[in-house]
Image (cartoon, rainbow, N blue to C red):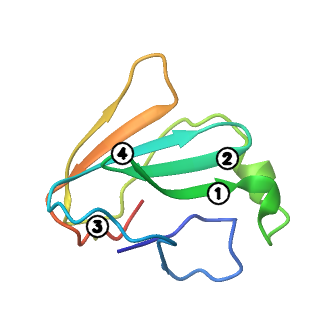
Amino acid sequence: VSYLIGYCRRSSSYTPFPVTLPVEQDKVWTITKTATALKIECNGVEVLNLVFSESTKDNCATMWSQNVEQIKFSKYDTATDAYRQQTGSNVSRSRARNSNLSTC
């Protein structure tokens, strides 16, 4: 399982998560974005905490510190069943059927 976050990595290829994902087949992804970081959890386990200012690309913080107007899942995503934004929060959730989720 891998991810791609534009403007924050030198490579434009998908990167494996830095930790092992939970083993459950059904996965609930929680994505939290602030002005300084993007945090991704899978079934309550933090799998990525990207601090924009620590990126090797200069424009990561500039691009990702802006307000979010929309989130897109790849057209190749075959694992996501649903997406729900929590009202009044920066938290979004995605439910995946299996561990083949390649977009986050």
Q: Is residue 51 above or below residue 69?
A: below
Q: Earlier in the sequence, mark 1 or mark 2?
A: 2
Mark 3, secondary structure of its residue: loop
Q: Residues within 10 Å of mark 3 (few under 14, many from 20)?
A: some
Q: Amino acid at mark 3?
A: Leu
Q: Amino acid at mark 4?
A: Gly
Q: Amino acid at mark 2?
A: Ala
Q: Earlier in the sequence, mark 4 or mark 1?
A: 4
**Residue at horizontal 74 percent and vertical 54 percent from the top:** 52
Location of the C terminus by quadrant is bottom left
Q: Which mark is residue 37?
A: 2
Location of the N terminus by quadrant is bottom left
Q: Measure how far apart labels 1 and 2 are at the Cα level.
A: 5 Å
Say which residue label 3 marks.
101
Q: Earlier in the sequence, mark 2 or mark 3?
A: 2
Q: Earlier in the sequence, mark 3 or mark 1?
A: 1
Query: In the displayed structure, does residue 70 sit left or right of residue 99?
Result: right
Q: Is residue 100 above or below residue 11?
A: above
Residue 102 position in % (x across, y down): 34, 71
Q: Measure how far apart labels 4 and 3 are at the Cα level.
A: 16 Å
